[in-house]
Amino acid sequence: MLAKRIIPCLDVKDGRTVKGVNFVDLRDAGDPVELAWQYSRQGADELVFLDIAATQENRKTTLDLVKAVAQQINIPFTIGGGINAVKDAELLLNAGADKVSINSAAVRNPELIDELAKAFGKQFVVVAVDTRASDGQNFVYLSGGNIKTTIETENWVLEAQERGAGEILLTSMDYDGTKAGFDNVLLKKINDSLQIPLIASGGAGKQQDFVDVFQQANVDAALAASVFHYGEILIPELKETLQREGIAIRS
Amino acid sequence: MIGIINYGAGNIFSLTAALKRVGVAYGLVNELSDFELYDRFIIPGVGHAGTAIQRLHNSGFVDKIKQTKKPVLGICVGMQLLSIYSEEGDVDLLGLMPLKTLHFEKRIKEKVPHMGWNTVCIKNSHPIFKDVPDKSYFYFVHSYFLEQSDLYTVASCQYGLEFSAAIGKDNFVAVQFHPEKSGVLGESLLHNFAHWQYGEELV
């Protein structure tokens, strides 16, 4: 049976891991390769690295990081940040990344999804979407949640799927950093509308939150950062809990 | 030493990194004469099966692959290439196994691609699964699958339907999942392939 995936997310800046609470107030949580290795040993199913300050100047640092991860880690990983064109993705692919995640660039230039899917296959393309609720509607936000668009989240994920996204990574900005649980209602709605896998992100605070997101929203994967980085949730214990709840998990 | 068939079908960085981690020597097969340098081969492959078979034909390696008696491991699209036909691109493939490669879409109600860790049931024992427990998890990413076969399926996987997770025939063996991304068990499988003495288990 296909297992639900647990994905630690490592925000990186200049080759170091950082995690912001609500995307501000960054704290250094260590060496990304070391952290990645720890997570793979603990039973993480996949890893996501977000290069939160990606620029042309630090591109080489990121590529070196991707290469080091690919050399040392035996589980799949995704890299996001600073991917604006097919050539950016190609460098990451050749450095050993399994998937790339595109966010604002895809909203600004939706054709990028088609181009990446055509060049490397759907399975290589994760479209990350930051969403926030306003007046009963859900809107896509850009640039780490700073810029509101008029695009409705429900429509955008379907367009992304249509254009060739292999997976959607949905972050609820209203829940991110709150540790109050995932946005299960929205995630269920989005998950039910999609034919491609959905990764839930934003709001994980305790083990039960993962149980709830899998049982209530039936998403394919759940992503979190700080609760893992600061050891508030240990992956082996989390997986035991999920298994006890009857959720298919890789043990 | 393993020769990786280098026909331009995708990235092999992850595969070579995994071989390094398990301490297995490898090189690249870039031209026909390189086939003499190695005692076994891996056919990698990601992306579109139609594109992959076209590139393999362009490489001029097809006859050599079909004729070799050395162990060959196909991975992912490299597995699909061993089948007779793929619905992806509606193309004829190498035909080393009398099985077809079919699209998940319209055959199952589950999401496509089949992406993530799934359990693999061993149907016919094979040296590459030595010390790999039945129902172990491996990492899959694919939208097309090889049919199940009593004769050739080494291991099967369930995703809306039952398909071949691994196939074997003579010196050819192949896996749909990515051993290079499947944790320590994936590494064991690569190690096993590197040490498979084809023919010995028949004695």
Image: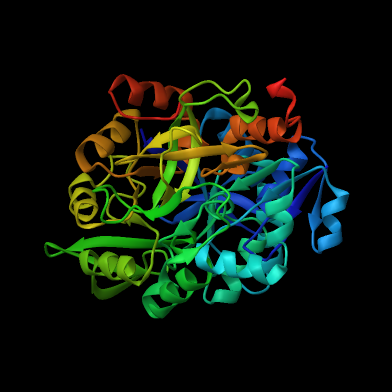
Q: Can residue B179 be seen in this snapshot?
A: yes
Q: Count all numbered tags in the image, as a single digit.
A: 0
* Residue occupying the point 27% across, 51% down: B107
Q: In the rendered view, does B103 fall on the left or right side of B141?
A: left
Relative depth, front residue between B187 and A151: B187
Q: With respect to residue A221, does B94 lie above or below?
A: below
Q: Report the residue that reaches farthest toward the left.
A: A136
Relative depth, front residue between A139 and B23: B23
Residue B43 x/y as whole percent: 66, 52
Residue A27 x/y as whole percent: 55, 47
Q: In the rendered view, does B167 fall on the left or right side of B65?
A: left
Q: With respect to residue A117, does B106 lie above or below?
A: above
Residue A90 x/y as whole percent: 61, 69
Q: In the rendered view, does B15 fall on the left or right side of B134?
A: right
Relative depth, front residue between B59 and A64: B59
Q: Quadrant of the C terminus of chain B?
A: top right
Q: With respect to residue B166, does B75 lie above or below?
A: below
Q: Quadrant of the N terminus of chain B?
A: top right
